[in-house]
């Protein structure tokens, strides 16, 4: 029997402003065997975002068709737009023993957990303090108080689900946060339930 193990589904969630995208990117750079699940979304691309790399940018009709055909592993509305995780690439990666990281929200995490209970590991990233999060969400100071209040409410909503995750870390030092996220991935790879092939060689 080979030592081939199933891949890990590492779901990283956080309120916006906590540094989740940076941590995810750094993890991908330092872990060549790890790949990013590229979601579909009905929102338009932002400056610098590339179709097929950051997201698959699609229209609502195509999105609805993917949902109906069962081709999304999870899907959710976030900030008035639709998002979802294509099923095919994830199932292929897991079966081949490749690990996948997901930059999705708590709603997606819940569905992923229900769909793939043996595969999913959840990591929640918190900002150092709520005051620091607000400072980051104020951005360059051009947004109205109402917009900032909306962002803070969304951030608090996301953080209210942190206890549903397996691991939580505070991003007050980027290097340490990346190291901690990598430790979660390494520990998940070593979980006995993923190592049946290895154990079979010794028993
Ligand atoms: P943004 O539009 O800023 O890229 O993402 C907004 C939020 O949607 C983020 O919290 C992001 O993690 C989440 N998100 C991105 N893709 C997906 C997805 O496929 N499923 C779910 N449930 N959330 C997603």
Image (cartoon, rainbow, N blue to C red):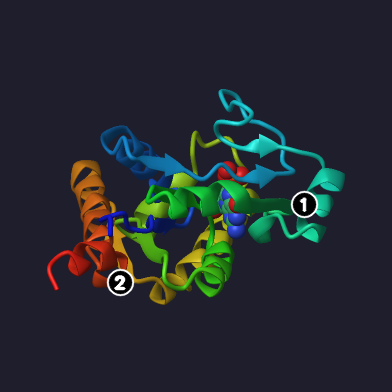
Q: Seen from this angle, which residue lies furthest front?
A: 1
The residue at the point 66 percent across, 31 percent down is 45
Quadrant housing the C terminus = bottom left
Which badge, 2 or 1, comes first in the chain's sequence?
1
Q: Nearer the viewer, residue 100 or 23?
A: 100
Q: Does mark 1 have its CB less than 8 Å from ligand 1?
A: no
Q: Is residue 62 left or right of residue 119?
A: right
The residue at the point 83 percent across, 51 percent down is 65
Is any atom of residue 148 visible in this view? no
The x and y percentages for residue 148 are: 57, 51
Q: What is the crowding at mark 2: few (fewer than 14 residues within 10 Å), some, or many (at least 20)?
A: some
Image position of 12 with respect to 50: above or below: below
Q: Which residue is mark 2?
A: 193
Quadrant housing the N terminus = bottom left
The residue at the point 74 percent across, 60 percent down is 70
Q: What is the crowding at mark 1: few (fewer than 14 residues within 10 Å), some, or many (at least 20)?
A: some
> Secondary structure beneath disc 1?
helix
Q: Which residue is mark 1?
A: 66
Image position of 11 with respect to 165: above or below: above
The residue at the point 47 percent across, 51 percent down is 102
Q: Does mark 2 have its CB less than 8 Å from ligand 1?
A: no
């Amino acid at each position: 029997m080979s030592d081939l193990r199933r891949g890990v589904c590492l779901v990283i969630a956080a309120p916006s402003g906590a540094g989740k995208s940076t941590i995810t990117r750094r993890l991908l750079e330092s872990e060549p065997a790890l790949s990013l699940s590229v979601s579909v979304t009905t929102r338009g691309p932002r400056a610098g975002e590339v179709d097929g790399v950051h997201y698959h940018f699609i229209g609502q009709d195509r999105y609805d068709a993917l949902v109906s055909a069962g081709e999304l592993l999870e899907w959710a509305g976030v900030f008035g737009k639709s998002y979802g995780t294509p099923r095919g690439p994830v199932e292929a990666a897991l079966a081949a023993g490749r690990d996948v990281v997901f930059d999705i929200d708590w709603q997606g995490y819940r569905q992923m957990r229900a769909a793939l209970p043996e595969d999913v590991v959840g990591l929640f990233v918190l900002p150092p303090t709520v005051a620091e999060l607000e400072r980051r969400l104020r951005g360059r100071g051009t947004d109205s108080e109402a917009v900032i209040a909306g962002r803070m409410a969304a951030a608090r909503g996301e953080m209210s689900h942190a206890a549903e995750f397996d691991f939580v870390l505070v991003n007050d030092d980027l290097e340490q946060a990346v190291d901690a996220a990598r430790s979660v991935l390494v520990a998940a790879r070593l979980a006995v339930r993923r190592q049946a092939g290895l154990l079979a060689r010794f028993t």
